[in-house]
Amino acid sequence: MKKTGAQILCESLIKEGVEVIFGILGGSVLPIYDTFPQYPQLRHILVRHEQGAAHAADGYARATHKAGVCIATSGPGATNLVTGIANAYMDSAPMVAITGQVARPVIGKDAFQETDITGITIPITKHNYLITDVAEMAKTVKEAFHIAQTGRPGPVLIDIPRDVQQEQTDFVYPDKIDLPGYRVISRGHPSQIKKAAKLINEAEQPVIIAGRGIIISQAYDEFKEFAEKAQIPVAHTLLGLSCFPGDHILDLGMMGMHGTGCANMAVQSADLLIAIGMRFDDRATANTKEFAPNARVIHIDIDAAEIGKNVPVDIPVVGDVKSVLTALNEEVEKREHVDWFSQIEQWRCEYPSQDIKQSDEVLPQYIIQQIYEATQGDALVVTGVGQNQMWAARYFVYTKPNSLISAGGLGPMGFELPAAMGVKVGCPEEVVWCVAGDGGFQMTIQELATITQENIAVKIAIINNGYLGMVRQWQELFYGRRYVDTKLWNPDFIKIAEAYDIPGLRVTRREDVIPAIQKAMEYPGPFLIDFLIEPEENIYPIVPPGESLARFFEPSRTEIWERKFGVSITEF
Amino acid sequence: MEDKPGVLNRVASLFRRRSFNIQSLAVGGSEQPGLSRMTMVAVGDSAQVEQVRKQLEKLINVVKVSDITEEGMVNRELALIKVKATASTRSEIMQIVGIFRANIVDVAPGSVTVEVTGDEDKVNSLLSLLRDFGVKEVSRTGRIALTRGSSS
């Protein structure tokens, strides 16, 4: 029996194990939506803006390790997906984005809502397709999921003209894939692994830099075995948080521009760095010329193009982290590094980055810490971008694998709410906290309607300082305190929540923080807390732009810092 | 690379996006149906060239990438050069063309068009000699190349 392109698409999605699709319909995807009722096993979640669909699919993908699926119509629907696709690309999240396209006879004629979305998304997708023949539909979907979910994951876009959705053909789902130009290297080269092990066994001051690749590869156990056996301290990139227990004795927390003093000192002083599933992002390394000057570098990554891209590498090991670590664990020796650990403990005391100041103010660090206390770490934390993100990264103790979902590479404000939706839909049994900034929250605020319509029980904590906080912090430190256009007039978020039928609480006093979090946890559905925090609270330490990782500044050590570097932080 | 719509765009987009410089680019069929061969000359130090190679490898439609800079290879370029020619200069031009084993492929009252094939140096040398007569138009294909020997 012949089937339409739309039916073939739906059946192919089901073959790929898809359960949820985030999207909004429009003229060029009507034939697809028209067939949805025939496939009740595909749950469609109607978002309020296509950016929300892409971020939700991304959140879903990161939480479940399955490709997230989003769908939008041609033209503006497709272009609205772009931010979300770019974000998934930067952070290697598997995603299949489906867009409608105008009918084939009018492609290239500037038809209504026509946009060259495959052209637009070439640099931000792992691959993309324009289907010009319905006979290509099943094969394309199969390839798209394979590409999105294997190797270094990423987004794949499929653009489908409306008339292809209606065209009919026989449905045969291919059981094989023929992609001569796509090879996934999974196992690391044995001789490279031996060389890496030799360096590790000989190192006196080794540090691991743990990236998101460990999470993508779900190599939590192998990684823990590796760090414990070789007794190597673990510094994390932002997206590498939650790959290793944050309360572990070997854990140094996050490194980088807002990393802990101890992590940054350890990385800068290391004689060997073992970089695993990370890409030496500038927010992690700061100035690469002065990065870890005495360290040899072992880089384990599945993407060969990451080797030597930003930082010179001594021993590259290209392969899947799980398989490489399994092999490496056989080769590394049990070590102790007593002197190195006593040095690290000294830094931990010398740089009290994690201390929260004693104060009656409502401090963001305290809020995050209390969310951790209330959940005991048994929650998934989804963050926005900016100060809220850094506080969430630093003051929640990530003891549960893959419990931080955050937009690292692209840094799109407004990620938090739709991504939290996707995370909760993917993991309905988990407690999901959405840590939002008051600025970013308003960029995707309309998804509150989706949350209510679909009863997605996320707990929303707005870290409200009435500013675009991270930018204000930069203006304060590096632009002579000139707060140009960072002060926000904000609506009453509790009334907004109420209008969306979501209960909420405003917190203005420190003693109300814990009860509000408790109330949110006890409430069965979505809940919003508007925390009015100290408006000019900053995230510290901070490495000034262009400086070395060793030059992190924290106010408790201002005098020592100025003596050491002969310059004030505001002079950068 | 696979002979599919948009592949050239993907390659060009990669070069632009990563700020790699392409000096020349030539693309056409290969020995295998469905596959094209692209020869490009990119300028950069060895780390940059290595990065280009790896990024190209990541394109799904690109089947194989070889950096043949250090390998024995045959490389050729074709150029068409339209030169001003009068009755008094025509024979001199023909002599130069003969020395370079190039051909005259079109003759008009005020000009001749020369076809030359060879490596870049040869094309450049001929071009510089012909400049004295007044070069009106030049069209060059960019280099194509294959490694020497029987390996593929």
Image: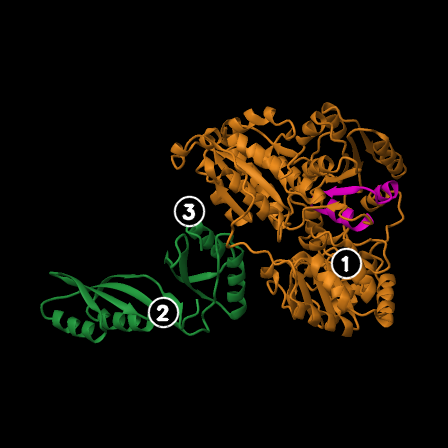
Chain colours: A orange, B green
Q: Nearer the viewer, residue A45 or B64?
A: B64
Q: Secondary structure at mark 2?
A: strand
Q: Which residue, given by chain and number where applicable, does mark 1 sit on? A: A223
Q: Secondary structure at mark 3?
A: loop
Q: Which residue, given by chain and number where applicable, does mark 3 sit on? A: B5
Do marks 3 and 1 share a chain? Answer: no
Q: The magenta stretch spans which residues?
A: A371-397
Residue A403 seen: yes
Check if residue A106 falls in the magenta segment. Answer: no
Which of the 4 quarters of the picture holds residue A42? top right
The residue under label 2 is which amino acid type? Asn
- Give the spatial CA distance, label 3 vs label 1: 43 Å
Q: Which residue, given by chain and number where applicable, does mark 2 sit on? A: B75
Which of the 4 quarters of the picture holds residue B93? bottom left
Q: Position of residue A54 (x, y in %)?
A: 61, 38
The residue under label 1 is which amino acid type? Phe
Q: Label 1: how many residues lie within 10 Å, few (<14), some (14-19) or many (20+)?
A: many
Residue at the extreme bottom of the image, as rendered? B99
Q: From the viewer's perspective, tell me whether residue A186 is left or right of residue A172.
A: right
Q: Which mark is residue A307?
A: none
Q: Secondary structure at mark 1?
A: helix
Q: Nearer the viewer, residue A298 or B15?
A: A298
Q: Label 2: how many residues lie within 10 Å, few (<14), some (14-19) or many (20+)?
A: some
Q: Earlier in the sequence, mark 2 or mark 3?
A: 3
Residue at the extreme left of the image, as rendered? B87
Residue at position x 83%, y 57% in the image: A556
